[in-house]
């Protein structure tokens, strides 16, 4: 998916950048943007000379109709031959200058994997009416997500993963009515997920793991019809798992591991479209619902390190497919059912329970 997306992006650059010339005000803004950054190894900014910033300026392309700068595409990890010749990945320091906001026709801003870029996301970024892609992954950007991010009504991709962003998820984020891909992983974001998160009707991936997010999992998430991938792992979420998550049409991956989630495992999750389910390292209790069947197809089902009790459900052996199963470190007890998937499981997937017995553990 990502590869196809990159190819389409690359093709559109090739088409656009040949035809246009650059307004002096856009050139000025780009030079001010460059002045706040320092890239000593690849020297890619050496190409930013001459009056026509739409021609042969590394990472810049312009809009066909308006002849204004439409895309900034600066990736620190790239297949570009320049990186091969330098025998290294990118490293850049400095900050993203607010001068970037003078490029009013910007449609995509990708400034990714430079590792050393600090400072904040310019607040004025929310005034760019055509912005579709904001990808700042893999830097050291701090500060908060702009409070009025919701003004970016065309935004489809917001990726600020692997930075040092703090603060809450702004309430206005749920007004991003075009958003398809949200990636906030590995930051320092705290506070709750907005209750009305389910307003993000176009969302297909919501990746919020490795933050300090607390409070409940909003039930409204289950209204996001296209959501395929929900990763809330390694946070401080508490309360129960909404059983409606198991009724979602295309949800394939649900990662809630390493939180403080309590209550029982909803039966709906085990007969749903979910194929990768990680609920490990929470405070789930009660029995594992005995509802598996021919609709249950799991590449991964990890329930380890909870407080689950009772027997291993017998219907597990009727599931269409169970790849990796981990039930270790719970309070399960009783005879392990015979047949798939238990005939191919390691003992370590079942150890540290109260009194399980039978293959692959000791006989009863
Ligand atoms: C599930 O999550 C835990 C904790 O984050 C992790 O250690 C484990 O590897 C994950 N399980 C699978 C099968 O990926
Ligand atoms: C686990 O469940 C038992 C009762 O089944 C309860 O006494 C205990 O406090 C629970 N432990 C945790 C860590 O929630």
Image: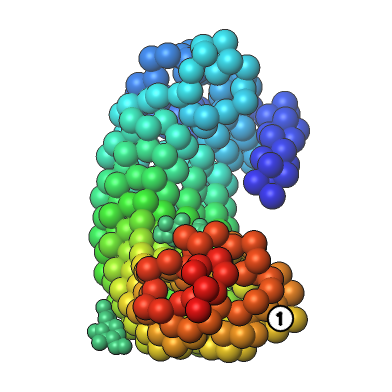
Residue 87, image x, y percentages? 52, 13
Asked whether, in this view, residue 51 is left or right of residue 192, the answer is right
Where, by quadrant of the figure, is residue 41 drawn?
Answer: top left
Vertical placement of 156 versus 354: above or below?
above
Q: Measured along the vertical axis of the image, is residue 83 above or below residue 345?
A: above
Q: Is residue 33 left or right of residue 213?
A: right
Q: Is residue 123 visible?
A: no
Tell whether 38 sits left or right of 11. Answer: left
User: Which SS class for mark 1?
Assistant: helix
Residue at point 65% right, 46% down?
2
Can residue 157 be seen from the camera position used here? yes
Q: Position of residue 353 (x, y in %)?
A: 39, 74
Which residue is at 74% across, 35% downward? 11
Q: Position of residue 304 (x, y in %)?
A: 43, 68
Q: Which residue is mark 1?
A: 318
Q: Pick the residue in front: 309 or 320.
A: 309
Q: Residues within 10 Å of mark 1 (few under 14, many from 20)?
A: some
Q: Looking at the picture, does residue 100 appear above or below residue 225?
A: above
**Residue lying farthest front?**
363
Residue 144 occupies which quadrant of the picture? bottom left
Residue occupying the far top of the picture: 85
Residue at point 48%, 29% (across, down): 76
- Viewer-side residue, 87 vs 135: 87
**Is 360 left or right of 171, judged from the image as shown?**
right
Where residue 279 sits in the image (x, y, percent)?
45, 71
């Amino acid at each position: 998916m990502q590869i196809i997306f990159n190819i389409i992006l690359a093709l559109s650059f090739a088409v656009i950048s040949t035809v246009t010339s650059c307004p002096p005000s856009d050139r000025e803004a780009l030079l001010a943007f460059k002045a706040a950054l320092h890239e000593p190894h690849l020297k890619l900014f050496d190409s930013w000379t001459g009056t026509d910033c739409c021609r042969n300026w590394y990472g810049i392309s312009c809009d066909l109709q308006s002849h204004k700068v439409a895309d900034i595409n600066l990736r620190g990890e790239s297949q570009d031959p320049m990186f091969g010749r330098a025998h290294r990945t990118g490293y850049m320091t400095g900050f993203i200058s607010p001068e970037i906001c003078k490029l009013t026709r910007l449609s995509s801003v990708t400034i990714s994997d430079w590792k050393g870029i600090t400072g904040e996301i310019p607040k004025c970024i929310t005034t760019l009416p055509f912005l579709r892609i904001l990808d700042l992954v893999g830097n050291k950007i701090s500060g908060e997500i702009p409070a009025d991010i919701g003004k970016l009504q065309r935004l489809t991709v917001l990726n600020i993963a692997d930075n040092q962003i703090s603060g809450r998820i702004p309430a206005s984020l749920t007004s991003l009515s075009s958003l398809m891909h949200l990636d906030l992983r590995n930051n320092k974001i705290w506070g709750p997920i907005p209750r009305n998160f389910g307003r993000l009707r176009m969302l297909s991936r919501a990746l919020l793991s490795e933050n300090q997010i607390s409070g409940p999992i909003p039930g409204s998430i289950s209204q996001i019809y296209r959501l395929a991938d929900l990763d809330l792992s390694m946070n401080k979420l508490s309360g129960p798992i909404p059983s409606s998550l198991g009724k979602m049409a295309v949800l394939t991956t649900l990662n809630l591991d390493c939180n403080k989630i309590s209550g029982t495992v909803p039966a709906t999750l085990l007969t749903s479209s979910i194929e990768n389910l990680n609920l490990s390292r929470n405070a789930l209790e009660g029995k594992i619902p005995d509802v598996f069947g021919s609709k249950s197809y799991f590449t991964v089902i990890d329930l380890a390190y909870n407080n689950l009790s009772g027997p291993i459900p017998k219907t597990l052996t009727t599931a269409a497919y169970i790849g990796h199963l981990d039930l270790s470190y719970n309070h399960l007890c009783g005879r392990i059912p015979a047949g798939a998937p238990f005939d191919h499981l390691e003992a370590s997937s079942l150890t540290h329970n109260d009194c399980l017995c039978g293959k692959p553990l000791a006989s009863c």
